[in-house]
Amino acid sequence: MKTAGKVFVVTGAGSGLGRALTLELLRRGARVSAVDKRPQGLEQTRAQAGDLAEHLSLHALDITDRGRVETLPDEVERAHGQVDALVNNAGVIQPFVPLKDLDEEAIERVMRVNFYGTLFMTRAFLPRLLARPEAHLVNVASMGGFLPVPGQTVYGASKAAVKLLTEGLWAELQGTPVRVTLVLPGAMRTDIAAHSGVEVPKAAGRARVPVLEPAEAARIVLDAVERDAFRVLVGRDARTMDLLYRLSPLAAARLIQRRMGYLLAR
């Protein structure tokens, strides 16, 4: 689906990849409803949009609040007259600790934001998307959704759930106007740790993994949307580890454990 002239809803639009997607969509001629829990982040996105901000609407809400999410499609249609695409990008990570040391509140928060937030948004907007001549659903999972990362086991489980949810929707929506794209990013330079309230271990600098800038990631994602791609791996690390995982899941898991396992050292 070409993005020009279309109305996109983007979650997590107050920072990181969500902000980069919002700005790139505006540059490509789309209109955007930007969704984020943090009003100040949305205002910063509007400021960076400059003159293109006239094609932008801001919606401050918590995607885990199902009742509030259910009112959003009407808000978007009042602002823009229609809705053609939904990008479920918002997410949080967990504290860098093993599962045995992770408290229940952190577990529930990660699952509610990453999985249930995506589910609530999808169910709220899918009837509107199905009514359009053409539409698109984009779900941002993670390389961690197919590759185990020590200290992010619940995060990985939440993103694995998003991955399979998206693949299932792709199958269910064949023969309808709605195309579906699964996004699997690797490491990106975002503030997800800070916005998740998580401290990154100082040892993380030893990982030496390639880190993609959000603006470049946004271009990759939207190019994939415009060619109706089923699946897009974002970043050299994601592409490399996807190939290795296909060849040998055990070898891929061992490599990540050796590179990242020290993050759990105390």
Image (cartoon, helix red, strand yellow):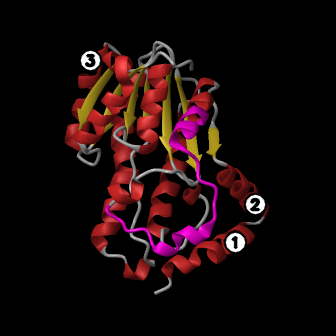
- Measure the alpha-carbon separation of dots 1 and 3: 48 Å
Residue 4: x and y, percent? Answer: 50, 15
Please identify the quarter of the rendering in which residue 128 is found. Answer: top left
The amino acid pointed to by label 2 is Leu
The amino acid pointed to by label 3 is Ala
Q: Helix, strand, or loop for circle 3?
A: helix
Q: Residue furthest right?
A: 247
Query: Tag 3 or tag 2, which sits nearer the N-term?
Result: 3
Q: Which residue is mark 3?
A: 79
- The residue lying at 59 percent from left, 73 percent from top is 260
Q: Which residue is mark 1?
A: 255
Q: Helix, strand, or loop for circle 2?
A: helix
Residue 70: x and y, percent? Answer: 25, 35
> Contact, CB < 8 Å: mark 1 with mark 2?
yes
Range of magenta residues = 197-220
Residue 139 visible, this angle: yes
Residue 198 is inside the magenta segment:
yes
Q: How many other residues sit within 10 Å of disc 2, few (<14), some (14-19) or many (≥20)?
A: some
